[in-house]
Image (spheres, rainbow, N blue to C red):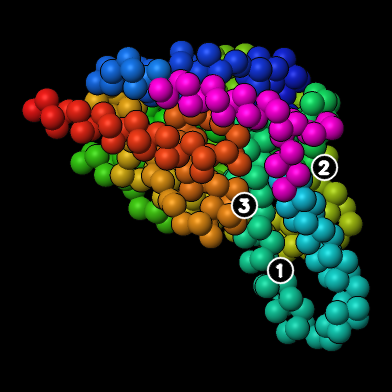
Amino acid sequence: MGSVGDDGRGDRRLQHRKPAVLARDSNAGHLEGASNMSAELREQAKDAVNRLFRQRESKGFWILEHRADIHCILFHLLVVTGYVTAFFLYLHPDVAHIKNRTEMAAFVGASVLLLGWVSGINLGVNFHNHVHLRLFRVAWLNRWFGRLWAITGCWPSRFWFHAHVTVHHSDTLGPTDWTLAKRKPDGSFENHWKYSLLHWPWRYARHLWQDYRSGTHPAFRQDAPREFLIFCVLYSIPFWIDPMMGLLLWFAPHWVANILILGSGMYVQHVGCEAESDAHPFRTSNTFFSRFFNMATFNIGYHNLHHSFPHIHWSELPEFQPVVQRIFRTDARRKVARH
């Protein structure tokens, strides 16, 4: 794992964890910490994880940690190309044969929806993969590519890392995980639309500010001012070119991305789930097996597996899923036989 907006110290500490550490890591220790699983099953799970990590180590290419990440880079570059194209056509409407305000409104409306859709995937799924497992073998390239990556979703990269890894993954559905939907007194989750509309940027901003002021996250407190300044400079560029263009074709798509795509995604991934415990070591997330969905979203549907083993590369999740399923089916059959 690692924040591309970090100064590199936290990146290396998190990214270079060895497979053996997985068994002890709070983010990936569901199988190890589950008292209702036999030592044999735990060893099977660890062996499977170690095997996949050995495979991952052999799949590097040039400056890439994993050759499959070329798909992540190409997707991001296509998203950037989409924004550049939209900006160009807005500033030069004759090229697209846009002749009046009605046609311009149609162009802007379609662009907002399409750019918002791909930006939500680019940040919430694509950049998400980079946050957990860095793409490049060069530290400065990871940091700057990440900074330029996260602005396409209206986020400073370091802030997104803090919210997702430090807060969400370290205590998924727990009392300190403020990234997810709130629970009602009866234990149910708040309405999907209420969560999506209120969480970004309002709740995120409040909690990030509280975490910054609290002093409980010294690395974030140290990095936040610098990273926020870099973000403001980069994010303001379209507004300097044309303020209305910046509002309509830069900020508006990011609102769609965070509210409709990321908000909805975070909600459905964890609604109805439970925090990790000995009784429920593998119920923190929902899993979606649709082949088309996972092909279009970098295997984000294997979200339960990802939360239990966040160090598994996104391209290898489908390979590991059957292993976990067999382990739990075997454990379930043994429990039934004993009772």
Q: Which residue is mark 3?
A: 121
Q: Which residue is mark 2?
A: 234
Q: Secondary structure at mark 3?
A: helix
Quarter occupied by residue 29: top left
The residue depicted at 26 percent of the width and 44 percent of the height is 188
**Marks 1 and 2, how far apart in space?**
21 Å
Residue 210 makes an appearance in the image: no
- Residue 157 x/y as whole percent: 69, 35
Q: Nearer the viewer, residue 100 or 95?
A: 95
Q: Disc 2 vs disc 3: which is toward the camera?
A: 3
Q: Residues within 10 Å of mark 3 (few under 14, many from 20)?
A: many
Q: Does residue 57 sit above or below 181 in this rendering?
A: above
Q: Nearer the viewer, residue 282 or 241?
A: 282
- Residue 312 x/y as whole percent: 56, 31
The part of the chain drawn in magenta is 44-71
Q: Disc 1 vs disc 2: which is toward the camera?
A: 1
